[in-house]
Image (cartoon, coloured by chain):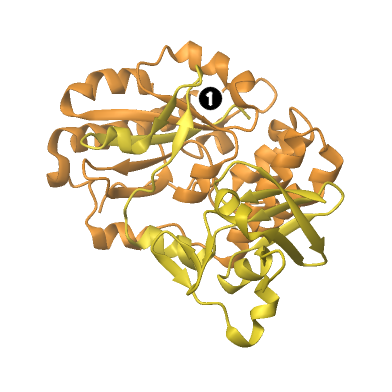
Chain colours: A yellow, B orange
Amino acid sequence: MSVTILYQERLPYVAAAEASGEDLWVAAGELPVATGWELRPQGACRGDVCVPLPRDREGNFVREHPVRVNLPALARLLGQPVIHEDAHGVWSFGESAAARRGDMQSLRAPDFTLPDLGGRAHSLSDYRGRKVFLVFWASW
Amino acid sequence: MWQALHEELAGQGFTCIAIALDSGGPAKTEQWIRAAKPTYPCLIDERHLTAELYGIVNVPMGVWIDETGRIVRPAETAATSDAFRRHLDRTTKQMSAQGLAERERVRAAYLGALRDWAARGPASAYALSEEQARQRLPVLHEEHARAAASFRLGQYLSSRGHGQAAAPFLADARRLHPESWSYRRQTWELEEPGKAGSAEFWAAVDALGDRPYYPPARLSP
């Protein structure tokens, strides 16, 4: 079956996957583009960060033939919220509160890229070297 | 208001960046952006991603970031106040003279602080030290992280035309993060256009009692 994965700030990604209860098995090959994570011998890695998978429960995380990964199990290991809607097959993976708190404590302004009305993308980092006043508003 | 400030201070290495937390996208925001005739970036965040990154729970709120990318004032109410709760006629939408004066006083104080920072940078009393800035960071609980994931799921389903399937997730976002007026008003608006400013909104504001809708920005360090 195919599911839509909403992984943190990434754009929705449609993947072939097996969903069952709180488990969602995604082909290891699709993992990097869907989530930024990949399987390496030392565990699940994203950039320089690797998380070892508990050896005694490895079967909860990875299955062979073909290699696939239980994405919610990885998210739970990382303390990330997982929410799913089964009628349309949509899975939402958030950032953990602890990771977000850590980022905030650093006081580094998190970068983002958003479009303007004309569709042109702007990143906060484009404005490094200036004092930036971010002001949030809405039409509602 | 922001266009005038941006023009005034751009020569001092200052820029405004406006972000619309608005799932309605360009269709809902275009008329406001065009009316402002902005020369600063006006960006549209349909998925409210930056609200999660910066801890934004209402609008208008502001964040100050210095030349090195360090946050010198975390998320806070920007240039507005609770004057509307006491001085706005809810039928005519007219603010009393007293309300207008109060709003103007709060606005002038906030703009004055921005001008001082633009001119004096780290020497400005309004540029918080790291210690002070950390003490003012938004509080973030597990429920808030769940609220964000629920909001994203509900917002996605809603954007695909699955309003009914979206409803419980949008309601969860409100329940899990009740301090977020932006989740509350955006999710209402997704459920039913106009609901964000309806009787339901006013009932929720009145239910605050003595608690603020817009916690005042603490401009004195």
Which SS class for mark 1? loop
Residue B170 point in image, percent of width and height: 74, 47
Left or right of A37: which side holds B120?
Answer: left
Q: Residue at x 66, y 73 (%)?
A: A61
Q: Which residue of the protein is positioned furthest toward the front in this rendering?
A: A65
What amino acid type should be assigned to the residue bearing mark 1? Ser
Residue B33 point in image, percent of width and height: 49, 17
Residue B183 point in image, percent of width and height: 63, 45
Q: Disc 1 marks which residue?
A: B96
Q: Quadrant of residue A59?
A: bottom right
Q: Can residue B79 be seen here?
A: no
Pointer 1 chain: B
Residue B92's place in the image compared with A26, above or below, is above
Q: Badge 1, how many Cα within 10 Å: few under 14, some, many 20+?
A: some
Q: Residue at x 15, y 33 (%)?
A: B119
Residue B136's place in the image compared with B18, above or below, is below
Q: Quick one: B132 or A42, which is closer to the camera?
A: A42
Q: Quadrant of the C terminus of chain B?
A: bottom left
Q: Quadrant of the N terminus of chain B?
A: top left
Residue A10's place in the image compared with A35, above or below, is above
Left or right of B113: which side holds A64?
Answer: right
Q: Residue at x 44, y 15 (%)?
A: B36
Q: Quick one: B159 or B54, which is closer to the camera?
A: B159
Q: Quadrant of residue B95?
A: top right
Residue B181 point in image, percent of width and height: 60, 45
Q: Residue at x 21, y 40 (%)?
A: B67
Residue A131's place in the image compared with B40, above or below, is below
**How many tags in the picture?**
1
Q: Can residue B69 be seen here?
A: yes
